[in-house]
Amino acid sequence: MHPIPFQLPRFYPILDTATLAQCECNVIAAAEALVEAGVRILQYRHKDPWTQAHFDEAAQIRNICQQAGVLFVINDRADFAYLLGAALHVGQDDLPPVAARRVIGDQIMGFSTHNRLQLTRANDEPVDYLALGPIFSTRSKLRPDPELGLERLRELRPLTPKPVVAIGGIRQENARQVLAAGADSVAVIAALWDTQASPKEIRQKAEEWLALLA
């Protein structure tokens, strides 16, 4: 944990390898486009078994982020986050935060929550920020937790002093409502990508998001 509270950037894009494969988007090109647009945080999310190719891909993105001063986050895997000197984001079924903290040392760590009990318990975990969702229905998760909605977000947000990134079905049309309901940041996966989007188009979409959430 860090003595200075972690400041979550308002826009939290996630490079989900399965989503990018469906859209026929190159992961490295997408990362470069997002960093060029001015994002301040970027997560690499690979839910299938990792291979050497995925580790190498993550290392390339780490280098891109490092050169631009962007916080690079690995999803789920504390071991790879440690090896890459990256921040880590873990979920309810991953290595518990206390154990993950022993692996990654003092790197930034986030933790996913989906309901009141998980959110309040997470206050005692050695993590720097919390994710809460899904806020709306989502296509980026095979077995999503129940949809919370804006009212539930508004009810739950005061229960933690930690920064909160809202996730799940967030699009440009509803993103500002999510911030107004108390979220410090919005995580975006599916709403960033179009089929065979070019790096230029990805950069433009990211710039729209950054302007919207400024």
Image (spheres, rainbow, N blue to C red):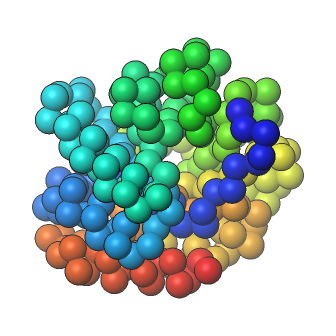
Q: How far across and down, in percent of the image, does residue 201 sit?
A: 25, 80
Quadrant location, the C terminus: bottom right
Q: Residue at x 21, y 56 (%)?
A: 28
Note whether 21 is above or below 150 in the view shown.
above
Quarter occupied by residue 24: bottom left
Quadrant location, the N terminus: top right
Q: Residue at x 75, y 67 (%)?
A: 181
Q: Nearer the viewer, residue 39 or 139?
A: 39
Q: Nearer the viewer, residue 61 or 47?
A: 61
Quarter occupied by residue 83: top left
The number of numbered discs placed on residues in the rendered structure image is: 0
Q: Is residue 211 shown left or right of residue 154?
A: left
Note whether 195 is above or below 164 in the view shown.
below
Note whether 50 is above or below 46 in the view shown.
above
Q: Residue at x 31, y 56 (%)?
A: 64
Q: Residue at x 73, y 57 (%)?
A: 153
Q: Nearer the viewer, residue 178 or 99?
A: 99
Q: How far across and down, in percent of the image, does residue 10 sit?
A: 61, 66
Q: Is residue 154 shown left or right of residue 179?
A: right
Q: Is residue 156 visible?
A: no
Q: Is residue 28 shown left or right of residue 131?
A: left
Note whether 3 is above or below 171 in the view shown.
above
Q: How far across and down, in percent of the image, does residue 204 sit?
A: 34, 83
Q: Is residue 103 visible?
A: yes
Q: Nearer the viewer, residue 162 or 116?
A: 162
Q: How far across and down, in percent of the image, does residue 68 sit?
A: 41, 62
